[in-house]
Amino acid sequence: MSDVALIKMHEGFVYLFLISLFIKVTLLIINVELFRVVRNKTKIVEMILGSLLLISGAMVWNAVYSFDMQGWILIKVVLMLAGIGLTIVSFKKESRPLAFLSVLIFVFIYMLARNHVAWGI
Ligand code: HEM
């Protein structure tokens, strides 16, 4: 697979993951009962999507940068792991502030991916 195709695939998993996260956090904030139902029914999908995001990220990292640990990639990986942990805890505790914080983390990771060259990191 070409580098461009790999990045497109990674971006595809990014959008699926972000849409699923936004829907669940919105439900947690506006309708906890529905959040519980949706979350219980999509636990496996959530795990698969999170893993595909990590694996595709690692594949792009290998293909484009041969696993060279650039500063922005280190920040990305650390925030990604922190964000996933925070999402799991916030969903388990049904904590709206923590869930909202996890959305902010993933939005920041997205902005970092798109702008790391412009930001000079
Ligand atoms: C540990 C997990 C991840 C790794 C190792 C990783 C790594 C990478 C790498 C190496 C690129 C290529 C960027 C370039 O060529 O300049 C990339 C692209 C991208 N990543 Fe990730 N990524 C990960 C997770 C994420 C997450 C969680 C998001 C969003 C929330 C994300 C969003 C993006 C986007 C939007 C691009 C395309 C950037 C562009 O070309 O404009 N990535 N990723």
Image (spheres, rainbow, N blue to C red):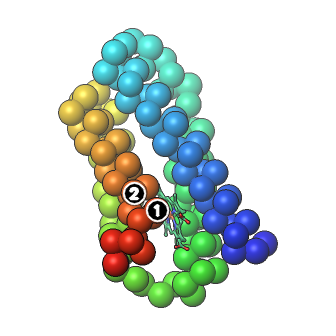
User: Can residue 10 be seen from the camera position used here?
Assistant: yes
Q: Residue furthest right?
A: 1
Q: Nearer the viewer, residue 103 or 112?
A: 112
- Indicate the quadrant where residue 121 lies: bottom left
Query: Mark 1 = which residue?
Result: 114
The residue located at (56%, 31%) in the rendering is 42
Estimate the spatial distance between the alpha carbons at disc 1 and disc 2, rounded to whole Å: 5 Å
Q: Where does residue 78 sit, x and y in percent of width and height?
A: 33, 66
The residue located at (68%, 58%) in the rendering is 9
Give the SS element for disc 2. helix
Asked if residue 27 lies left or right of residue 42, the reply is: left
Q: Is residue 52 above or below residue 43?
A: below
- Indicate the quadrant where residue 60 lies: bottom right
User: Can residue 83 be seen from the camera position used here?
Assistant: no
Q: Which mark is residue 111?
A: 2
For the N terminus, which image quadrant? Answer: bottom right
Q: Where does residue 13 sit, x and y in percent of width and height?
A: 60, 51
The residue located at (39%, 71%) in the rendering is 118
Asked if residue 84 lies left or right of residue 90, the reply is: right
Q: What number of labels is visible? A: 2
Q: Is mark 2 within 8 Å of ligand 1?
A: no
Question: Contact (CB < 8 A) between labels 1 and 2?
Answer: yes
Q: Is residue 85 above or below residue 23?
A: below
Amino acid on which disc 1 is placed? Arg
